[in-house]
Amino acid sequence: MTKETAYAVEVDRLTKRYGDLPAVDDISFTVRKGEVFAFLGPNGAGKTTTVEIIETIRPPTSGKVNLLGMDVTKKKHDIVHRIGVLPQGFSSFDRITVRETLLYYARLFSVKTDIDGLIELVNLRDKTKEQYRNLSGGLKQRLGIAIALVNNPEVVFLDEPTTGLDPRARHEVWEVLLGLKKKGKTVFLTTHYMEEAELLADTVAIISKGKVIAMGTPGELIERNANYLSLTLKPIDEKVFEIVRKMGFGPVLDNHKNIKVRVEHTYDVQKILNAIKDAGALYLGLDVRKPNLEEVFLKLTGEALREDPDEMETE
Amino acid sequence: MNLRIINANLVVKLMGFYREKTTMFFTFAFPIILILVFGTIFMSQDSMEYRLCVQDLDQTNSSAQAVEILELNGKFKITRVDPAVNAAQYVRVNRVNLVLVIPKGYERSLIQRMMLNDQNASVTITYIYDPSSSSVITKMQILNSVLAVINQGMSGKPPFIRSVEESILTRKYRFIEFFVPGIIAMSVMTLSLFGTVDSDTELRQKGIIRKLSTTPITRTDWILSNILYHFILAVISTIAMLLVSYAVFDVSLHIDAWLLAFILLDVFAFVGTGMILTRFVKEAQSAAAAANAISFPMMFLSGSFFPIELMPGFLQKFARTLPLFYVNEGLRASMVFRDNMAALRSAAIIGVFAAVVFILGIVATKWEEGK
């Protein structure tokens, strides 16, 4: 039975094991209707397994998952009509055109869809007669997003929609996703791109080794987990490094010989600058900024998030 | 089961097939090429004329008459070999498989036998032959029977044992009429088996099945549209084969509902087999190899190309365990012999096989991801 709820997704103590190996380990979270929820984690963290359980593709080992108030293990038939899915590594029929593919999926859902509107939304106007095999990586992903929207779903799942795309193609996909956000769709996004999560998500959950280790808005996560400032100095005198070190701040040199210092307050920055000035040393410039999600992630998990650049596909 | 969904899936599959010209060519043209090649070979064999080299060492009117008798038999096209050359050398150098040598003294012996009634007078004709040639034995057998007839004629007495041919069929059928049903059975098998295995493994590997499992299409809809798709291709392919067979070889084959029934059973049996294979073979390349491993023995041992009676006893027994054997038998029973009871027996056997394999195939088809 469907129950009215403010949540699009409710995950309660979800566990998924492959043999003895827990891919998802006793996680709980909720996704509010109308929000963009980003599931952030490195490869193998359990993102796709979790999302595939919610999408009804995979059964859980234990725990409870409700989607729009329906139990995903019991109401698959009802659920598939109300969700749209872009699976990881999306692919389609090679010799079927963009328009024919959208018509095919619309027929599967037995719905009358504004195919032209969808094509417009994902900016594939010039490619409607192009067969899938002739599309570039970015265009294929945009078609995948259009397919996910063909039944006008209440919740859209996008599993790593920009993985493997070059920066331009990635920005084009983000434009489409921002359009969905404006339309008020509930979007469940899995990604390992920080800027993607920061740009698009209302709520971010960080998953590592099958566990949700932090959750909140991007601002909250930064505030909660990285309450410091990053000072970068471009020194002229080599003694600047020594001056900062003697003050007890633990400076580090990056590849460009810039000095990076982590400080807790803005007056620490002033203190360092005054000490350099008093010593008669010189610097070319400085940069003070708050940490980003990537630094939060590194701090929480100790794992890097960037994908292998070799996997990038050019448009 | 949703007919709209089955129809949508069917249309996409047919469009994809139509646009893949290479697959389309091999699906439809390959069996036609087989019919044309084998048909031509065996049609010419029905009226085959052997080349026969004859070396007449006697060089008399009687020996020339003997050569003429051989020529008039109609089975041989005679090449005369110079009496001065070495016959064995001639066989090697000219790559012929046999030289018939009429010995010197042929006419003298003939006169002794016929005119002087000397019953001990005889001649020995020598076959100088290359034993590595596969057709030379047949050629020698025909020569022996021709010589037997000549000897019988010379005895002046009518033969005691005569023979007459009586076919169990109301009319005389040619090899091509037995061959075409076998090729129909084989091509429907290959298109169903390879079509299912190739397409299912590719779609699974590319994640399209996973995407489809998040839509309203069910496993039943998917399988039924696959069956329908392969049945349509099989019917088109069969029509093309029959048209070519009628146009080129003027075949005499009976076409009725049994033909459609056997095509449908053939499709069910081998789509089912393909679905089972797909469960165990994960990658497209290994899938093609696995399908080959099943289809090749089936093609050559089930009597599609040649009668199983030509095979050793144990292989004949094995052939009778192959499902394609019963499709061949059933199609020949209905199209050639017009024997409804024999067709029904074959249909029952292949029907049971198709049902079992198809049910196993449905169970084996993985629609959602594993537990």
Image (tube, coloured by chain):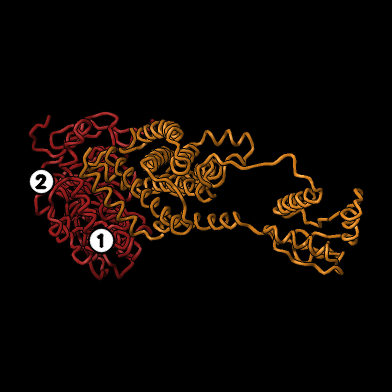
Chain colours: A red, B orange
Depth check, front residue: B356 or B160? B160
Report whether A154 appears left or right of A22: left
Q: Is residue B149 left or right of residue B250?
A: right
Earlier along the polypeptide chain: callout 1 or callout 2?
Answer: 2
Which element type, helix, strand or loop, lies under badge 1?
helix
Q: Which residue is mark 1?
A: A139
Q: How many discs mark residues in the rendered view?
A: 2
Name which residue type carries label 1.
Answer: Leu
Q: Residues within 10 Å of mark 2 (few under 14, many from 20)?
A: many
Q: Quadrant of residue B282?
A: top left
The answer to whether one can see residue A222 in this image is yes
Q: Chain of mark 2?
A: A
Between A104 and B41, the residue placed more toward the observer is: B41
- x and y, in percent, of residue B96 in the image: 74, 62
Image side of residue B75 versus residue A100, left or right: right
Q: On the image, numbered disc 2 is attached to which residue?
A: A34
Residue A310, horizontal then vertical, whole percent: 38, 59
- Position of residue A133 measured from the top left corner of the image (x, y, whole percent): 32, 60
Q: Nearer the viewer, residue B76 or A69?
A: B76
Badge 1 sits on which subunit?
A
Pick whichever, B120 or B227, lies toward us.
Answer: B120
Left or right? Give the position of B69 relative to B36: right
> Closer to us: mark 1 or mark 2?
1
